[in-house]
Image (cartoon, rainbow, N blue to C red):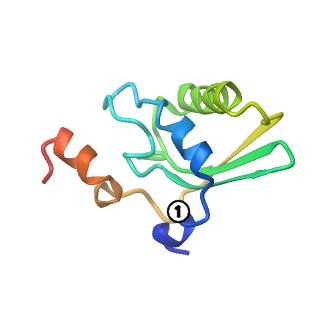
Amino acid sequence: MTREKQGAQSDPRVMEALRQVVDPELGINIVDLGLVYGSEVREGQVHVTMTMTTPACPMEELLMEMVHSAILRELSEARSVEVDLVWDPPWKPDMMSPAAKAQLGRT
């Protein structure tokens, strides 16, 4: 499944909450970095499918905690959060939003 197709299935409320999760190494939110592949809210359970920039990302645990916290804080109906960390498709710099690319000097 392509990233664009997955993104079309995303809940906009979850995506907005996840814009508050900023990668501590890059200073850019995980949505604009292209790390979030999809999200869904069903009966109070929030499911997020995402990746990291690399399987050896040293910030993985911290980012997962930040994702959980942001969703529980911003979505009043969220009772639980499940994050599915995937490696396919692998993250590539071209998955970043134009704003993120510009911030990193990649136009």
Secondary structure at numbered mark 1 = helix
- The residue that appears at 29% across and 60% down in the rendered structure is 94
Report which residue position mark 1 lands on: 7
Quarter of the image containing the C terminus?
A: bottom left
Where residue 16 appears, x then y in whole percent? 52, 41
Where residue 37 appears, x then y in whole percent? 54, 57
Compared to residue 3, the image places residue 10 above or below, namely above
- The residue that appears at 55% across and 25% down in the rendered structure is 62
Task: Looking at the picture, tell me which residue is in the foreground, 54 or 78.
Answer: 78
Compared to residue 25, the image places residue 9 above or below, namely below
The image quadrant that residue 70 belongs to is top right
Q: Is residue 45 left or right of residue 71?
A: right
Quarter of the image containing the N terminus?
A: bottom right
The amino acid pointed to by label 1 is Gly
Compared to residue 63, the image places residue 101 above or below, namely below
Q: Is residue 99 left or right of residue 86?
A: left
> Residue lying farthest right?
43
All told, the count of numbered labels is: 1
- The residue that appears at 83% across and 34% down in the rendered structure is 79
Where residue 43 appears, x then y in whole percent? 87, 48
- The residue that appears at 49% across and 65% down in the rendered structure is 89
Task: Looking at the picture, tell me which residue is in the foreground, 26 or 43.
Answer: 43
Where residue 87 appears, x then y in whole percent? 54, 57
Residues packed near mark 1 inside 10 Å, few (<14), some (14 to 19) or many (20 plus): some
The image quadrant that residue 100 belongs to is top left
